[in-house]
Image (spheres, rainbow, N blue to C red):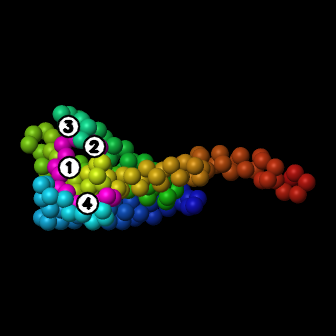
Amino acid sequence: MKNVSPKRPRTRVAVFVIVAVAALVLDRLTKLWAQAALSSDTTVVVIPKLLGLTLVHNPGASLGMGSSVTWLISCVALVACVVLVYLALTTISLWWTAALTLAFAGAFGNLIDRVIFAHGFLNGSVVDFLNYGWSVGNVADIELGVAAVMIVVLLLASVPFSAKEAQEQRDEQSQSPQGRGVNGR
């Protein structure tokens, strides 16, 4: 899993573009489909007691929290998108690039809705349609969740984010007994 490419910025940019475009297109297409095919007053059961389809326009964040400060949620999402792009393009790991890009795509996908459906300054609603019974979400939310899991796995696997971290790991390994040759050399 330690796919590290410090001298390949073009590769990281390509991964960023491919993952971001694919994730954003998937999110937009599913939201357009949901708006055309679903209504807010009915639920289409896909998997009984697990998944249904219901159209919801959510002005808040997860579980509708923050509905009265949608503009603030939008501003935080905008800052997060900028930070995620920076981090995704500065890491040396393609795995980190993919995870951060997926997080960017999820945040940006929902931010696009907030801009498109705004009635004032960034106060629009997000199109949600995946009804889990306890919450209604969308593909961008799934992308954010997958990115979060990937980030946890990368942290647990000690995949280096920067060249400095990679060098520290190499130094640590060379100083450990397993990193030395026969007879501790």
Q: Secondary structure at mark 3?
A: helix
Res. 151 mark: none
Is the residue 23 above or below the residue 89 in the image?
Answer: below
Q: Name the amino acid type tagged 2.
A: Leu
- Measure how far apart labels 1 and 3 are at the Cα level: 11 Å
The span from disc 4 to disc 1 (Cα, nearest Å) is 18 Å
Q: Is residue 122 left or right of residue 8?
A: left
Give the mark nearer the N terminus: 4 vs 2.
4
Q: Going from the N terminus, do you reach mark 3 or mark 4 first?
A: 4
User: Marks 3 and 4, how far apart in space?
Assistant: 23 Å
Secondary structure at badge 1 equals strand
What residue does disc 3 label? 67
| Residue picked out by circle 1 | 126
Local crowd at mark 3 within 10 Å, few (<14), some, or many (≥20)?
A: some
In the picture of the structure, the residue carrying the numbered disc 4 is 52
Nearest to the eye among marks 3 and 4: give it. Answer: 4
Residue type indicated by callout 3:
Ser
Residue 79 in view, yes or no: yes
Q: Nearer the viewer, mark 3 or mark 2?
A: 2
Occupied quadrant, residue 109: bottom left
